Amino acid sequence: MATMKRRQVLQLGAGILLLGGIDIPTREHPSIEERTQLTRTLGEGIAAGWTLFHIASPAQVIAVSKSQLALLQQVHADVYPAILPMLYSGVYRLTGAALHFQGRYDDAHKAHQKAYIAALDDADLWNMAQSRSWQAYGLSALGNHTDALQIADAAIRLITPQIDTESIRLQARLLAFGAENAALLGDARGAESRLAASERLLEHLPAPHEEFDRASWLQQAGICALHLKQNDTAAERLQQALDELPAQWSLRYISTALPLIKAYTSMRELDEALRIVEKTVPVVRSVQAPTLTTEFQSFLEIELPNCFTVNERCRAITPEALRQLAIA
């Protein structure tokens, strides 16, 4: 993705690179076949945008989603009305997700509210719950864990009656996310209960999957343990998650590696911590997600030196790592 030109990214957003092109109807009254093909291709293009989300930088994803939204608005009248709410919800949510990783939480919240309203127009419970889940992520990132937990629970209630695979996957993800917020609030029992409920749903979910799978559960379980000062358990689960994670999912790699480094640091296992640091810096630099870059920089500048003030290897690696992050 680092070598992909902006024009190519925009083409991908319009469904051209992955889908072989979009034929926009030129007649005033397109045929059923033309409308069907257009609607299908737009849906596939938005799905491709979400695939891109896991491997590209937030800036590239925003460019893609804006391209998709402009295209959707251009052909609005030619798309089947029953499908429009789902398409708009997916595009707005993609924009909001990318804004989230840029640290633009207010803008992200507004985008997810648009996604929710679009889904509400068609009583699309899955997309409504997805939009709420991302709003909960934003609240959690701002430190409002109580409200984040409440919104996550509300999203779970929306999809609990659904038994399709993607609804079960979303429910499992929300339960694991809720566990993390419970841990941050010091509720160990609540975190354990939610993690157990999430784990029970894994048997229904083929793996791996970008949105949530066993590696995701291990990541969340490890983060919960880290918040609860259970560093041995945290390191074990986070290392398992990192080992199971497909290499191309850059955002998830960073989000797993950072707490793993912190767990190793808390255990005073410098060699393991620095091993992950060296592997993670190039990924952080390539993804260019400001929220993750800032978190990593803060750790290297403050937490790591405080733990290993006189270690020569730490002194040698940290300045170069910070230089690389500054470039990002």
Image (spheres, grey):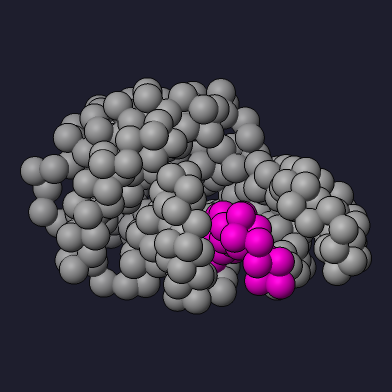
Residue name at image x 17 percent, y 35 percent: 157
Indicate whether 295 appears above or below 122. below
Whether 256 is among the magenta residues is: yes
Residue name at image x 18 percent, y 68 percent: 203
Query: From the viewer's perspective, is 85 left or right of 248?
Result: left
Report which quarter residue 116 is drawn in: top left
**Viewer-closest of 163 and 265:** 265
Report which quarter residue 8 is drawn in: bottom right
**Viewer-closest of 109 and 70:** 109
Is residue 285 visible in the rendered image? The answer is yes
Residue name at image x 86 percent, y 49 percent: 326
Query: From the viewer's perspective, is 250 left or right of 74?
Result: right
Q: Position of residue 53 (x, y in %)?
A: 54, 55
Please give the range of residues in magenta: 249-273
Indicate whether 172 appears above or below 122. below
Residue name at image x 32 percent, y 72 percent: 207
Q: Position of residue 54 (x, y in %)?
A: 53, 59
Q: Position of residue 201 (x, y in %)?
A: 19, 59
Q: Main secondary structure of the magenta part?
A: helix
